[in-house]
Image (spheres, rainbow, N blue to C red):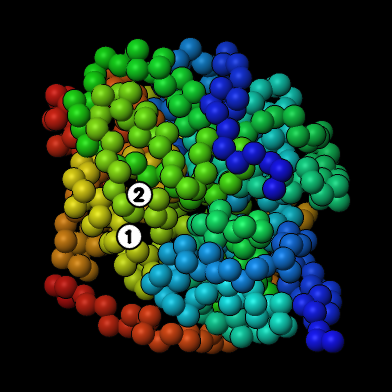
Amino acid sequence: MRERDADRVDNLDRLVDRYHLVENLESCLQCGKCTGVCPVANLSPSYNPRQVIRDILAGNKDRWLRSEEIWRCLWCANCYTLCPMDIPFPLLMMQLRYEALENSYGVKYFLPFRRFAMRALEDGLTFTPGGARGRERIMKLRGRIGLKPWPDISEKARQEYRELFEATGAKAWMDAIKEEEERPVTLTYLQGRITDAKKKGG
Amino acid sequence: MQRKRVVEPEEKIREIPGSVFLFRSCTGSLEYPGTESAVTETLRCLGIEPLTDPDQTCCSGYLLTCSAHTPEVSLAVTARNLALVERKGLDTYVFCNGCYGYLKELSHILLHNQEYLEGANELIARWGYHYAGKTSIFHVQEMWYRLKDRLAAKVVRPLNGLRVGVHYGCHYLARKYDILDDGGYPTFHEEIVEALGGTPVFYKERQLCCGYAVGRGFTHREEVVQPHLFKKLRNARDSGVELITTVCPGCNVALDREQPNLRERYGEDFRIPVVDLAQLIALALGVPAAKLGFEANTVPLDDVLAKLGISE
């Protein structure tokens, strides 16, 4: 008798789904609707959600961890919207990216967000302007249209937000990813890479 | 698949509440603060009092999906924020698709996984919070649609046939269940535009993602985001769209702020202003333009305001 899929994917959760968020991955029909509707697959054909699932189920996950493709996903979740089996593909992508980072792949695609997160830890808000001038500009604008100059957020809120990052180990996880240990990612579809963007007037 | 995908607005919001908890959006308060005031003003016009709480923090979902940190913290932050609302006995209304998607998804995970719920509650118990899942999460656009006729009756400044192209945003439609329309072919924004006296434009790429999703604007701007946005905006322009509306301040950033860069790269100047749907509603309801913060926009609204006969 030929092997069944289930024989090949023992302990799927340990393979990739550590948070138990994509437990129906094995139900994938390989119908490819996800890829047909994916705006990134449209621009960068080597990014293929259907193939990602197939490879993971076949135990061939590492090629994606080492890839640049997984960092292109826009998380629009169109794949999930169309999926006849309700596979929450973005939650799979999220966990693939964690694993890539823990293996030092894609670190450059993580660093800007760690910087944002560190600032969010101070403010309790994301995307606050970094410099004093940016802050002043927004406070003036808010004031002019009749809002409080700064969003109404208490010291208690900011403190508790910060403490949750410490208490859950989220901050330690972020700190453990080292820029200097970064390993290069590969992009299969080289034509998709734009290396000679024309700079006008420069 | 027993759950219902698309629900009627009357089914979604059975009774119109006298007050709601308005969940602060970081981008909607800092990048385009006019969104915050437009939502507040519009709710008041409809006879609904928006209440806020300074103890509410960022939903933390955006950086989670950017892979900046792991989910444990976002689950705890969600439990904490929603516990605050539960104490007030109110439902939660957000004005950002990001907040909507993340609060819905994270609270769903909490309420369907005993271990996650207990873990989060244990963490927030130190400050006396407890989350039990009693507050329902809505996007304000659901209220706009539910009260579309009430809105239409209150229009004092009709849109004069302004050609509006709507942008629904992925993180609303991708909820897939229990929303006003699924990702198939939603029309409820267009119906709202029509109720305000505008002309909705069904441009082909209207359901295309804004492209800034989970930070790719910071990491893959030239390779993915710009070609993607160029396709969307070119299609909107060719269909005669004069104004784009969003229901997510994040989408607003992508569609508005990126236009000068697209001009630089592709040599095409779209100059299509992008505002929040609430800003357009507030304008039609007669809220002074000076209160709606259009000066935060990269692409100015001068032509649109002139067409509506508004001089600032």
- Name the chain under label 2: B
User: What label does residue B229 carry, if any?
Assistant: 1
Instruction: Determine crowd level at label 2: few under 14, some 14-19, many 20+ residues with C-alpha closer than 10 A.
Output: some
Name the residue rendered at 27%, 83% in the picture.
Answer: A196
Image quadrant occupied by the C terminus of chain B: top left
Q: Percent position (x, y) of residue B223?
A: 37, 73
The reply to whether label 2 and label 1 mark residues of one chain is: yes
Query: Is A158 situated above or below A81?
Result: above
Could you say which is closer to the camera, residue B231 or residue A167? B231
Q: Amino acid type of disc 2? A: Arg
Dot 2 corresponds to which residue?
B206
Q: Amino acid type of disc 1? A: Leu
Kindly report the distance in space between the C-alpha atoms of the residues bearing marks 2 and 1: 11 Å
Specify whether B122 is left or right of B138. Answer: right
The quadrant holding residue A13 is bottom right
User: What label does residue B220 carry, if any?
Assistant: none
Name the residue rendered at 71%, 77% in the picture.
Answer: A57
Query: Is B158 situated above or below A143?
Result: above
Q: Percent position (x, y) of residue B51?
A: 57, 22
**Of callouts 2 and 1, the N-terminal one:** 2
